[in-house]
Amino acid sequence: MKPAFISLCLLFFIGASAFPQEKEPILIFISLDGFRHDYVERFQPENLSRFIAEGVGAKGLIPSFPTKTFPNHYTLATGLLPEHHGLVDNDFYEPEKDQVYTMGNRSLVQDGYWYGGTPIWVLAEQYGIKAASYFFVGTEAPIQGVRPSYYYDYDGGIPNLTRIAKVFEWLQLPESERPRLITLYFSNMDDTGHRFGPNNEAELKKSLFTLDRQLGALFEGLKSFDLPIHVVIVSDHGMTEVSQDRLINLDQLTEGIPARVVNNGALAHLHLEDPKEEEKVIQLLLSRNPNIRIDDLNCKENYQDPSAFPQRKGDLLILPEKGYYLADTPGMMRYQSQTARWGTEVFGEHGYRPTLSDMWGIFYAKGPLLKSGIQVEPFSNVHVYPLLCRILGLPIPTAIDGDAAILDPILHK
């Protein structure tokens, strides 16, 4: 471990061990955005590999549809499918408000109207457990009128080590003020995966090993606290390779179709002016490009509940095949500029069907209540939430999609 990371840990060793052992468990819930299920096996990062060997690791964490950042982070936090918690995509149209929710609009992101379910930090606060967040989707909004006791508005420029240092500060607080739930978010692997794709060994390894050293600083620092700390590490989705020649111009594809087109990438939502024209529109779209599929939202292949939030999902979904990607005209120009600047004709994207293993993320966990040295089969990310409730001793809400029985076997009886 490099001296800078050792110094970070030692900074918080002093006085930390003075705290007595608590009976009540502490949970640190970490998201590593865009961390694909096979990265650890491929690159063998030292600290994460040791963490997994000493705890629990899954062969893959299967995201919910669509395999995008906001829907899946909030699914991890609530145990609900995106169509049940309401964030049906990163960007979507809400006819009732005549607004397009987008993750780049800070006023909407911080508006509790958009967020259904009971995220783990809200449940914790409702039962008298203080929660803290150095970023996680939903923590900036008053959901059911509740925010974490400690939280920050998202700023991707905040260094990872600053976030980690704040964890140590929170754990040093007096017992009455100390959070028992802490969420963290790191975007390293998503940023690198988008820029270079998931097959650029050199760039991925460089980012992964930097992140691994930072996590190593966290793991080492936590050892100094005489507290029953549990760490659960997840990711929202994986990544697949897309080449510039497989971009599909969404503006040209939908030209002349009377509909509101929302979002792009691995899926676009069409809100038709006349829903009776649905079949005609489907045939027209399919005739324009052989590398797309159309979902009329009556099937359960993508969104599993056709009746939930139908107004936000629209009438039709345009779904490019794996390796193809929808972009509007400005997006096409942006990709051309980016690939020229980064010196590569390929990049990475996500959002495709969860059945594609490239979309699978990670689940690693370690702590006193958890068994060690075991590996579990891939499972749906809706089942993470009940485990978080179990660790914190919280009642599991009944109206969720997750099932506690899936991960109960990794807990000590």
Image: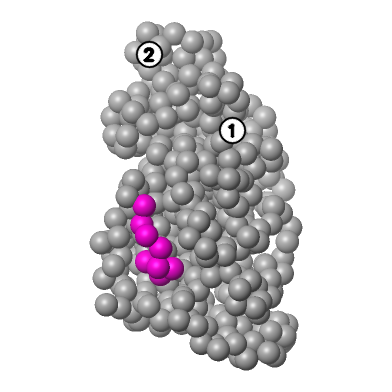
User: Label 1, label 2: how many angstroms apart (C-alpha)?
Assistant: 24 Å
Q: Nearer the viewer, residue 323 or 273?
A: 273
Q: Amino acid at mark 2?
A: Glu
Residue at label 1?
Answer: 101
Disc number placed over residue 312 in the picture, else none: none
Counting from the top left corner in percent of width and height, residue 411 is at 32, 74
Q: Main secondary structure of the magenta part?
A: loop
Marks 1 and 2: CB-CB under 8 Å? no
Q: Secondary structure at mark 2?
A: helix
Q: Please tell me whether mark 1 or mark 2 is closer to you in this view.
A: 1
Query: In the figure, 340 relative to 196: above or below?
Result: above
* Residue 27, horizontal then vertical, whole percent: 49, 70
Q: Residue at x 25, y 61 (%)?
A: 405
Q: Which residues are magenta?
A: 390-397
Q: Give the secondary structure at mark 1.
A: strand
Here the colouring is one colour
Q: Residue sitting at 53 percent across and 59 percent down?
A: 125
Local packing at callout 2 (Cα closer than 10 Å; few below 14, some 14-19, many 20+) is some
- The residue at the point 30 percent across, 72 percent down is 410
* Residue 256 place in picture, x, y as percent: 53, 10
User: What label sits on residue 278 in the rendered view?
Assistant: 2
Which quadrant would the N terminus be assigned to in this image?
bottom right
Residue 142 within the magenta-colored segment of the rendering: no
> Viewed as shown, does residue 282 lie left or right of 331?
left
Residue at x 44% of width, y 8% of height = 274
Q: Earlier in the sequence, mark 1 or mark 2?
A: 1
The answer to which of 326 and 100 lies nearer the viewer is 100
Amino acid type indicated by mark 1 = Tyr
Instruction: Please tell me whether residue 194 is drawn above or below residue 132 in the rendered image.
Output: above
